[in-house]
Image (spheres, rainbow, N blue to C red):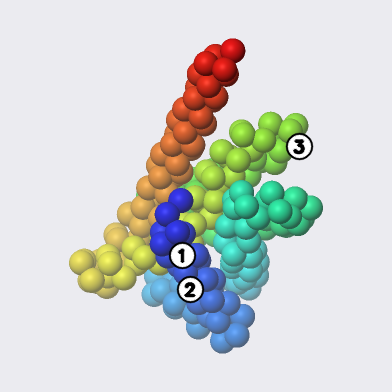
Amino acid sequence: MNKYFWLLFNLLVITVAGYVVVQYFILDGTQAGLVQMKLMFLSKLSPFWYVMLFIHAATSVVALVIGPFTLSSSFREKNISRHRVLGRLYMLCILFGGITGLYLSFYATGGFVGKIGFGLLAVFWLISAFQAFTNAKNLRIPQHRNWMIRNYSLTFAAVTLRLWLPLFALLFGLENFERSYAMIAWLAWLPNLLVAEWIIKQKLTKGQFETNKKNETAKVSA
C-alpha cells in the first residue's frame, strides 16, 4: 500500500477516534452531536439507549484504533503473540459493538431506509468477524486475512460516515438532514466493502503472479 495513503488512512482513524473519545468520554456525551440530532426527531431517549450508545462508542473506537495493527503484515510477522492478543480484543469489541449497533439501528434517523442501512451494517459486521475468527481458528490464514479486510472496511464506516455528513449538509442543507442521513446509512459502508473486495482481488492476483513466476523460475532451473 502506498505509504502516503497509509499515512492519510491512519490520520483519519486517529482523528475520528479522538473526536469520539472527547465527545463521549471527556465532555458530556449526552450533548454529543448524534444525541442532539436524535432529539430533533424524538422527544426523549431512554436510559437504556444511552447505555447501549456508550458501549457501542467505546468498543467501536477501540476496534477502529487497533484494526490497522491486526491488518499490518509487518507488525504481525514481528509480533505474532501481540497480534493474537490484539485480534482477540478486536473480536470482542466487534461482538459488543455489533450487538449494540444492531439495537441502535432500530432508532436510527432516516426512517425505514436508514434503519435497514445501519441494521445491515451491524449484521455484516458481526458475520464478517465470525468468518475471520473461525478461519483463524481452523488455520485458514489467507481466508482469515480476507475476512479481516472486509470486516475492517465496515469498522471504518465510523470514519466515512463522518466524511459524508458535512458534505451532505453542504450540498442539501440541514433542513433535508433526515433524507440525507438515510443515504449516508448506506454510503458509510457499502463503498468501503467494494474497496475491500478490490483490495482482496488485487492481493489474490499478486499472489497468483508471484506463484507463477516461482514455478517458471523452477522450470528454468530444472
Provide the secondary structure element on which disc 3 rests. Answer: helix
| Mark 1 to mark 3 CA distance (whole Å) | 31 Å
Q: Sequence order check: which comes first, mark 3 or mark 2?
A: 2
Amino acid type of disc 1? Leu
Residue 84 located left or right of residue 147: right
Q: Which residue is mark 3?
A: 137
Q: Residue under label 2, please give it.
A: 15
Tell me if residue 30 comes above or below residue 221 in the rendering.
below
Q: Is residue 169 left or right of residue 205?
A: left
Residue 194 falls in image quadrant = top left
Q: Tell me if mark 2 has few (under 14), some (14-19) or many (20+) residues whose alpha carbon lies within 10 angstroms of its own.
A: few
Distance from disc 3 to disc 2, alpha carbons, whole Å, reads 33 Å
**Please, what secondary structure does the residue beneath circle 2 have?**
helix
Q: Nearer the viewer, residue 123 or 9?
A: 9
Check the image and name the residue furthest to the bottom. Answer: 27
Whether tag 2 and tag 1 are in contact, CB under 8 A, the answer is no
